């Protein structure tokens, strides 16, 4: 691991020297939120939307935003500039801070602010060309999945399930309805219509969610947000994932079933191209 510079509570320090107290509520309770922002050619992609979601996450769990937008942009820029890679993924985490261990919010605590960046790891050329396999699982997470919380045990177990099965993602269903994958949103295509689950408390609204809606509108691809059954996923013409690091990625197999023709489909191809164009602006 390279000893890159990270930002922690007011200072830039090498990651090997960045330390937090054991009573940090992030460590004790998973009491915090995070954000992952892709960076291309040293420029954040969709930074306004990512910062707006960071602010929503803080508000959702009652942490006073420690910085205004300008300050956040300056802090992120410092970390980004210190890294040698042009294409990065910036990770931001804010916890409720350090306090004596008691579940309810402490009277006084200063939020812990951590920012790091790493070279972005995008899907391989093979994954792009051939699509990827996934497995399915019942969604056993809590009912506030719209918050980008650092309490990610349910997501960790779903990701581990994918890893143990040698596939890219675990696609989750709650009561027979599609929710999302361990760290990405899931989309299906049927008869030329791109569909995704509604943005309610059962999924994290990815920054790519709004982007995909915009790309669909621009390319005249009909879009519907609605509840999607397990059966509809398995019989879809196309399935795809989206996230900051997967961008859009075709799924050609779930469990032991082939999706569509077993190759990345035409709507995926169109969205992938449109995504690359949006990035380059
Ligand atoms: N994950 N759903 C979940 C549960 C996620 O963790 C993510 C992102 C998404 C997609 O959101 P976005 O389009 O904003 O990346 C959906 C990030 C990349 C992560 O945890 O590393």
Image (cartoon, helix red, strand yellow):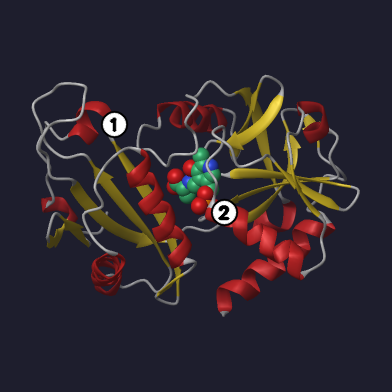
Vertical side of 77 occupied by 266: above or below: above
266 and 26: which is toward the camera:
26
> Relative to residue 63, is residue 126 drawn left or right?
right
Q: Earlier in the sequence, mark 1 or mark 2?
A: 1
Q: Is residue 195 visible?
A: yes
Left or right of residue 9, residue 117 in this image: right
Give the quarter of the figure containing the N terminus: bottom left
Quarter assignment of residue 31 = top left
Give the structural element (helix, strand or loop) at label 2. loop
Res. 246 mark = 2
**In the rendering, at what x and y percent does residue 13 appear?**
13, 60
Instruction: Tell which residue pokes out farthest to the bottom in this image.
Output: 281
Residue that badge 1 annotates: 30
- Work out which quarter of the rendered image holds the C terminus and state it: bottom right
- Say above or below: 119 vs 148: below
**Separation of disc 1 and disc 2 at Cα?**
25 Å
Taking the spot 31% from the left edge, 66% from the top edge, the residue there is 69
Q: Foreground residue, 70 or 243?
A: 70
In-image side of 53 versus 182 (left or right):
left
Q: Is residue 240 above or below residue 164?
A: below
Q: Residue 97 at what x, y percent from top left?
A: 16, 40
- What residue is rendered at 34% in x and 45% in y? 59
Question: Which percent across, then down, holds residue 28?
Answer: 20, 27
Q: Residue at x 49, y 66 (%)?
A: 46
Question: Mark 2 near ligand 1 (CB under 8 Å)?
Answer: yes
Q: Residues within 10 Å of mark 2 (few under 14, many from 20)?
A: some
Closest to the camera, between mark 1 and mark 2, is 1
């Amino acid at each position: 691991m390279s000893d890159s510079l990270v930002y922690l509570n007011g200072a830039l320090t090498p990651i090997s020297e960045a330390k937090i107290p054991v009573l940090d509520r992030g460590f004790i309770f998973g009491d915090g939120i995070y954000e992952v922002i892709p960076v291309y050619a040293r420029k954040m992609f969709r930074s306004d939307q990512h910062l707006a979601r960071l602010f929503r996450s803080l508000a959702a769990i009652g942490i006073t935003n420690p910085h205004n937008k300008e300050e956040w942009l300056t802090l992120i820029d410092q970390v980004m500039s210190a890294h040698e890679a042009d294409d990065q993924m910036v990770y931001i985490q804010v916890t409720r801070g350090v306090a004596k261990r008691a579940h309810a919010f402490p009277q006084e605590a200063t939020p812990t602010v951590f920012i790091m960046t790493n070279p972005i790891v995008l899907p391989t050329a093979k994954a792009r060309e051939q699509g990827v396999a996934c497995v399915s699982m019942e969604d056993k997470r809590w009912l506030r999945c719209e918050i980008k919380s650092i309490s990610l045990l349910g997501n960790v177990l779903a990701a581990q399930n994918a890893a143990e099965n040698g596939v890219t993602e675990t696609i989750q269903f709650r009561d027979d309805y599609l929710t999302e994958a361990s760290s990405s949103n899931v989309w299906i295509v049927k008869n030329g219509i791109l569909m995704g689950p509604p943005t309610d408390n059962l999924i994290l609204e990815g920054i790519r969610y709004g982007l995909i809606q915009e790309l669909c509108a621009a390319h005249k691809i009909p879009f519907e947000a609605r509840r999607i059954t397990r059966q509809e996923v398995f019989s879809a013409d196309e399935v795809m994932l989206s996230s900051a690091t997967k961008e859009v990625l075709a799924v050609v197999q779930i469990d032991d079933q082939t999706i569509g023709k077993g190759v990345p489909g035409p709507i995926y191809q169109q969205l992938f191209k449109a995504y690359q164009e949006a990035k380059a602006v």
